[in-house]
């Protein structure tokens, strides 16, 4: 793995900057969590209402994650060239613009505009995920997963509060002449815009640029050892990126597919919007709240061990969701909790694997490209979820997703047993 970053966090300037970076990222993530929750909670319902079709209810999720794929490339490239702050700010502002577009589409009753706006809105989701990499830029290898987890857990506040504001924001929307299902996007636009402001003002010094500076200084101070430093093979680095990407792609695909159709499934069986919002809020809490514990486990027990646990947990989520009676909010809550937890295991472990494997010189660009594959996986999961439920039912989607998640287990087992890995 690439260990040169440890020099950055051991530097007093790097240590102080890391603490400041994490504080600022926590504030921004708490805001942006409310923004991403809007699309999760009512995006599918809005499309179902406008199109009068369950089969296309997964399309908003697919478009949002497709938009996040494009944004991942853009944010990654901007971050590579100019630093984390410009990349993250641009991503969140784009998400805010998309939120405004969704509201305009709902007012106009225009499905085409809705789909375009949801595509743009997806940039906020991608940026929220990419922020985790900024938390790891100045972290040493032994603390990298925990740094990632601190950034992720901050999303919990907004992610849990957001869905529970579905009813109040819907009432606000009606009061100002906007369709009620567009109400949560009022919150989303404001949340993303505020997150951009926080990062633009306070994310200084830029963690990625500072990490590069500190690493260059460390190498310059040890000229005799620089030439003899171990150069890890491209094959080994490529293997680390591949393993981490597979883990996160599977977790994202399964999580998005099942999560997207759960509100539709509940709505079709008479559950209230409040009950649906509660289930999604608990699910999002499970996606982010366990992050400090997950980060500790990844650093303590190993990246590959927790990555394998991710696949097993997602299988459990699919089985519980498939077996839950249609009128049981409790079992659906358990299933969505396991779904969020399995995703969390996969994301933290996969992020640590990739960050370990990629040098600072190409880190942001590579991370952006990996997040493209994650976004495409989410888009695919959202896109197929509607037709699968329409033709085979929600239980089939749930158990099928759980079985698919198990692919990560042999992948990480093979990587851990490879002589290329310690």
Image: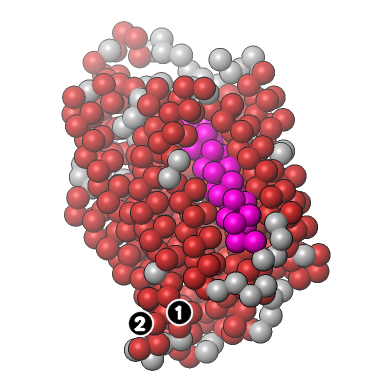
- Say whether residue 333 is left or right of residue 5: right
420 or 278, which lies in front?
A: 278
Residue 112 numbered mark, or none = none
**Of helix, strand and loop, which mostly describes the magenta segment?**
helix
Give the residue drawn at x 64%, y 14%: 419
Q: Which is nearer the N-term, disc 2 or disc 1?
A: 2
Above or below, 351 relative to 63: above
Q: Which residues are magenta?
A: 328-355
Placement of 144 over or under 79, stated as above or below: above
Please say if 227 is above or below 318.
above
Give the structural element (helix, strand or loop) at label 1: helix
Q: Quadrant of the C terminus?
A: top right
Q: Say above or below: 246 vs 259.
A: above
Please name which of the two marks, 2 or 1, marks the residue nearer to the observer. 2
Residue linked to disc 1: 182
Residue 142 lies, in percent from the top left, at 40, 22
């Amino acid at each position: 793995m690439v260990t040169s970053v440890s020099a950055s966090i051991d530097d007093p300037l790097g240590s102080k900057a890391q603490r400041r970076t994490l504080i600022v990222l926590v504030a921004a993530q708490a805001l942006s969590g409310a923004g991403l929750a809007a699309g999760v909670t009512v995006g599918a319902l809005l499309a179902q209402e406008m199109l009068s079709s369950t089969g296309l209810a997964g399309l908003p999720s697919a478009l949002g994650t497709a938009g996040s794929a494009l944004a991942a490339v853009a944010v990654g490239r901007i971050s590579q060239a100019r630093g984390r702050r410009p990349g993250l700010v641009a991503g969140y502002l784009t998400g805010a613009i998309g939120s405004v577009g969704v509201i305009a589409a709902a007012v106009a009753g225009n499905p085409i505009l809705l789909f375009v706006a949801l595509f743009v809105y997806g940039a906020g989701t991608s940026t929220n995920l990419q922020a985790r990499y900024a938390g790891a830029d100045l972290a040493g290898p032994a603390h990298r997963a925990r740094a990632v987890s601190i950034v992720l857990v901050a999303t919990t506040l907004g992610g849990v509060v957001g869905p529970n504001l579905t009813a109040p924001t819907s009432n606000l929307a009606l009061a100002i002449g906007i369709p009620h299902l567009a109400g949560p996007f009022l919150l989303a636009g404001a949340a993303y815009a505020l997150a951009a402001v926080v990062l633009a003002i306070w994310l200084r010094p830029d963690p990625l640029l500072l990490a590069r500076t500190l690493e260059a200084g460390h190498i310059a101070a040890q000229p005799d050892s620089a030439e003899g430093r171990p150069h890890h093979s491209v094959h080994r680095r490529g293997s680390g990126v591949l393993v981490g990407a597979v883990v996160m792609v599977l977790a994202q695909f399964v999580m998005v597919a099942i999560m997207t159709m759960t509100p539709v499934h509940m709505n079709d069986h008479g559950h209230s919007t409040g009950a649906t919002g509660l289930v999604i809020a608990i699910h999002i809490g499970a996606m982010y709240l366990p992050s400090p514990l997950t980060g500790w486990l990844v650093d303590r027990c190993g990246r590959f061990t927790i990555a394998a646990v991710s696949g097993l947990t997602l299988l459990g989520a699919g089985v519980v969701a498939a077996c839950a009676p249609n009128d049981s909010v409790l079992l659906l809550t358990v299933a969505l909790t396991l779904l969020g937890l399995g995703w969390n295991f996969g994301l933290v472990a996969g992020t640590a694997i990739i960050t370990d494997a990629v040098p600072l010189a190409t880190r942001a660009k590579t991370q952006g490209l990996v997040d493209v594959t994650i976004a495409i996986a989410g888009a695919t999961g959202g896109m197929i979820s509607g037709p699968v439920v329409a033709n085979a039912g929600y239980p089939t989607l749930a158990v099928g997703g759980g079985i698919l998640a198990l692919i990560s287990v042999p992948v990480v087992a093979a990587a851990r047993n490879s002589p290329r890995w310690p």
